[in-house]
Image (tube, helix red, strand yellow):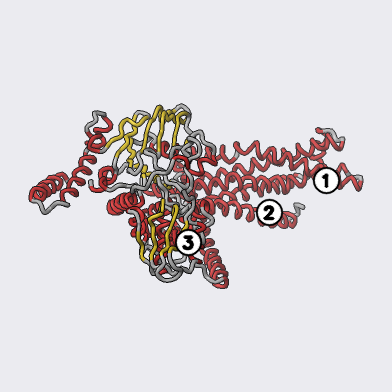
Amino acid sequence: MAEREVDPLPEVEPLPDEDREGDEPVLGRHERYRGEFPIEVKGLKNSFGEQIIHGGLDLAVRRGEILGVVGGSGTGKSVLMRSIIGLQLPDEGQIDVFGRSITTGDPDDVVGVRNRWGVLFQGGALFSTLTVGENVEVPLKKFYPELSDELTHEIARYKIKLSGLPEEAVSKYPSELSGGMRKRAGLARALALDPELLFLDEPTAGLDPIGAAAFDVLTRELKQTLGLTVFLITHDLDTLHEICDRVAVLADRKVIAVDTVPNLMKIDHPWIQEYFNGPRGRAALTAQALDELRKHMDMPIAANAVKALDKSSGKKA
Amino acid sequence: MERFAGFEVDGEQGRGATLALTGPWLVSTIGAVETALDASEDAATRLDLSRITEIDTAGAWLIGRAAEKRGAGISGASARAQRLIDAVAGLGFDADVSAPREALATRVTERMGEMVYNARRGSYGLIGFLGALILAIASIARHPRRFAGKAFVRQLELVGVAALPIIGLMSFLIGIVIAQQGAVQLSQFGAETLTVNLVGRITLRELGVLMTAIMVAGRSGSAFAAQIGTMKLTEEIDAMRTIGISPMEALVIPRIMACVFMMIFLGFYSMVMAIVGGAFVGDVMLGIPFLTFLARIQEVVPLYDLWVGLIKAPVFGLIVALAGCYHGMQVKGNSEEVGLRTTLAVVSAIFAVIVLDAFFAVFFTNVGWG
């Protein structure tokens, strides 16, 4: 895939060590995270009453990757995300984000982390009494009140454009937007603080195929341009094939595998096999293969392969 | 290592100078430099980014803005800086971030006009709802097997039995307050014994039923509106219609009937509890033995006072349940509407109950039940 070649973060000279206070990996507001794993989860346990959701879950997210998280319904994908962003206190386990503990850190410490991530909730979770533009300004005003009003407005406006919304959306209320636009507005708010880490909870759920594909492209472009690390929960096989660098599979209360899609398909686990090699998984794979081949239509072998594949998939349909 | 974004002017002030940008240009660090950059009258023709340590889109935006204002070129940008500057270039536009606001005069008149229209639509809606209700009652009368008996019993429990503790406590306390306050005033005339008349007549005629109606509006009227409203939002009511179940028969009639029946019992229960409260105060404060107080009630309170209360009770129950169900059925659109309609259901129910109570007071006095 082409995007793998793009270095997500350009070389900037590493920060001198004496600038750090003690050996605490504390990030100043003038630094971006340089470590290898922005998110590290170790031995996470979550339960609701008798029902154990996670037990001994380990996961490390690499800087600059799009990590897809998949799993059957009820395997706790959203609970995992809520644990990482500190909305759900786990029973046991250690969660470090940007090298700082979310589980044991005191709340003021965590604030230094909160302005480095953006979260897109499933329904967008926009504040319904504010316009889209005002929604984007909320985190800016909260964390950086020193910015002038003019600059805050400008940042909100270009973030809205960056998220692929039309200009007139800026002064509309969430209730006046379609589902797809609401997702994009939620994304604009998630990007408001130029986060280094972006959480997306089922971003393409409820979108039509065209809208979903456009959102995938947008996610990939933003990741490349802004150098984001993306934690992406999804059910969408096309999204997995198209944009995820690695995929983490949640089953049996833990992450049973983290790897690229082709490597995952070789793993002999009933759920993984059913998921990726079931009819929908194969269809998504074929579609992705066709897309790749179409880029090389000048070569006869590719053109023939496209014809053959088109026929076979046409028959199936 | 600089902790905030900054800049230096290299060379002569004026045309041809170079603006060397330094430090981290992040959204977290550009707060101070923004105004300084705007105020600087350097007229530089070149922005040198080679000493920038970190950059994000907000920094890139500010640099782009500064370069555009001066008509200056950019040099020394790292790959990331160049990519970000290119990414945000041309994304700016002029539009108000807040929703446009009309002038005050326009907004006030518009809102008033809207209210008139809403009032008309509301009264049409209410009449329509009453019509549908009467039709549903008639249809159930013809086909009694369609009556949702289980739902009715369930509502009897929710509206009536579950409300017993709170209504009992409320009435008991009201009885205490009336007796205690009444005794204080009446003792000035040496007429403490008339406390019995006061407690008995006021709770039977007015307060027992009125307070119960208010409590039921708050407990059950709001619940009706919220339940039915949520069911409308989740398309449960549409699903019922497609299966051939009338939501009027399945949801509204059991609730209204339960509320009407239970108001009679709750009203009576409330009167009893208030008198017990009064008798308690009489025993403790006024030296009237408990049982004597109850016996005196029988002597000084005419029987028609009880009828006045018990006639009003089902009417109030009907109003409370109607308001709850009507507003619940009016919910459409989003979840915000559920809250709005629930509030409306309670407010309009209590208001209607109090207005009607005033009419009843005049009416019963005129028919000789004074």
Per the model, the C-alpha gap separating discs 3 and 1 is: 67 Å
Whichever of callouts 2 and 1 sits on the residue coming sooner in the sequence is: 1
Q: Position of residue B204 (x, y in %)?
A: 73, 45
Tell me: residue B55, above or below residue A263. below
Relative to B198, B169 lies left or right: left
Q: Residue at x 43, y 61 (%)?
A: B62
The image's mark for residue B357 is 2
Number of the front mark, 2 or 1: 1
Task: Please state which of residues B4 and B247 is positioned toward the viewer in this rendering.
Answer: B4
Q: Crowding at label 2, few (<14), some or many (≥20) Cα neighbours within 10 Å? A: some
Could you say whether the residue bearing mark 2 is in a helix, strand or loop? helix
Judging depth in this view, the residue of B56 and B12 nearest the camera is B12
Q: Amino acid at mark 2?
A: Asp
Location of mark 1 (residue): B182
Q: Position of residue A243 (x, y in %)?
A: 28, 46
Residue that carries the numbered disc 3 in the rendered image: A151
Q: Quick check: marks 3 and 1 in contact, CB under 8 Å?
A: no
Q: Chain of mark 2?
A: B
Task: State the separation of the CA atoms marked 3 and 2.
Answer: 60 Å
The amino acid pointed to by label 3 is: Leu
Q: Is residue B358 left or right of residue B195?
A: left
Name the residue rendered at 57%, 73% in the picture. Answer: B105
Residue B144 in view of the camera: yes
Mark in the foreground, 3 or 2 = 3
Answer few, some or many: residues within 10 Å of disc 1's Cα (few below 14, many 20 plus, some between 14 and 19). Answer: some
Q: Is residue A236 above or below residue B292?
A: below
Q: Give how far apart the Cα atoms at labels 2 and 1 are.
A: 22 Å
**Left or right for B75, reference B302:** left
- Using the rendered image, report if marks 2 and 1 lie on a common chain: yes
